[in-house]
Image (tube, rainbow, N blue to C red):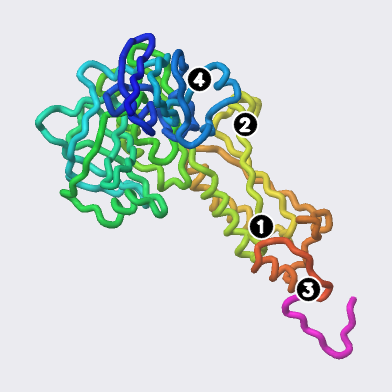
Amino acid sequence: MTSNVVIRPSGRKFTVEQDESILIAALRQGVQLPHSCRGGSCRSCLARIINGEFSYLHGPPIGLLPADGPAGRVLLCQAKTSVDLEIEVRELDPGPGISTHRLPCRVQRMKQLAPDVMALFLKLPSVEPFLFRAGQYVDFLLRDGKRRSFSIASPPHDADPLEIHVRQVPDGRFSGWVFGECQEKALLRLEGPLGGFFLDEKVAHPIIFVAGGTGFAPIKGMLRHVFQAGLKRPMHLFWGARQEIDLYDLERGEHFNLVARVVANGKNLSEQLTGLYAGIPIPKFYVVVIFEEVAKDSLFVGGKPHTKFVRFKVDHIARTMPGPVIREWWIRTIDETIAPFVKNRGFDWEVSIVETPIDLWSLQGEIPPPFESVGEKRWVKENKASPYTQAEKLPVNLALAPGISDQ
């Protein structure tokens, strides 16, 4: 059964097949509607029902708010209909000559950008140009009818070949194929361009780009387009990653004199510090690392604002440093550990250590067992706090001899 859908205020029409989402039907027929996740969580595809009825493919989506139903609002990516509909939603205008096509492509070459990121450079048919806006994406059409969406990392002026970034996902069918079986000259089918994530070049406001992992791909295409078009707008890139090696292709930003602020995840630093203390050894769960961001206008050094300053405050409880020589050695050891995260990125920093008496400390209601005791060694092995016996308070290497008594 086929239903007709009319879009207001444009008057554009398209049809929807039974058990097909309204969004997918629109995109299939070249009608560009706002969307992003396609999973019912981001609310980008929110529309208002003027006339007609609908239902959801898999029950109410997670992004639906209590007020949406009474107000007639619907998430098109999860909605289906068996009757004619009239909806109110903003249509996207990618630009003149840009329309969605299905076409074959060939993997011209591959390049590994990071340990788990592969760039595919795709050769498209030369019969007609593949027109798109920087930031849009394509869908790869798999043999079983499923799709995999990937943003275009190329700018429109340099899209031969078309660049796509693929992150390796555990048990991922398509990414597993890319990293395990894909070779140059492999054939694929794609549909695109799709999506409404592109720049509004009619305004001159500063641009703030925020990306995580391979979310950098469409932004890369946008940046190259901006520079090629000569647009004079301040730009800031905030790019989050699990570790610095995942921040790939940064030399291009330096080449364009891009004002870039790279925001690396603190996970790597916390792992380095945990490993440092675990080597003493102490249980890893003794090491707690907390990152606290301070507002830009709330940090002053010497009475003057300082925007590139990091303060490390360390509480020593499980161990204390016996004497000035050991203390200096440990401060220098910490400095060497954190230097790649601060000094090498142009930050000023300081480290201070405070020592707290161990008898003023508990974990999960347990007073930690004594230093180098049987109980502490068990906590190291299990990496968790748990009750221990009186006997486990004894040292691991206990030595008893006649005539020696407890002092």
Which label lies toward us, 1 or 2?
1
Query: Looking at the rendered structure, which numbered label has been put on residue 392?
Result: 3
Comes first in the chain, label 4 or label 3: 4
Near mark 1 (Cα within 10 A), the count class, few <14, some 14-19 or many ≥20, is some
The residue indicated by pointer 2 is 294
Q: CA distance from mark 1 to mark 2?
A: 26 Å
Of the residues under marks 2 and 4, which one precedes in the sequence?
A: 4
Q: Are marks 1 and 3 in contact (CB under 8 Å)?
A: no
Q: Residue at x 58, y 40 (%)?
A: 349
Identify the residue under disc 1: 285
Identify the secondary structure beneath mark 4. Answer: strand
**Quarter holding the N terminus?**
top left
Magenta-colored stretch includes residue 393: yes
Element under disc 2: loop
Q: Is residue 101 above or below residue 113?
A: above
Return the residue at label 4. 73
State if disc 2 and disc 1 touch (CB < 8 Å): no
Q: Is residue 256 above or below residue 335?
A: above
Category of crowding for the residue at label 3, using alpha-carbon neighbours closer than 10 angstroms: few (below 14), some (14–19), many (at least 20): some
Residue at the farthest bottom position: 402
Of 13 and 392, nearer the camera is 13
Distance from Cα at disc 2 to Cα at disc 4: 39 Å
Relative to 304, is 23 on the left or the right? left
Mark before the other along the chain sequence, 1 or 3: 1
**Front tag of 4 and 1:** 4
Secondary-structure class at tag 3: helix
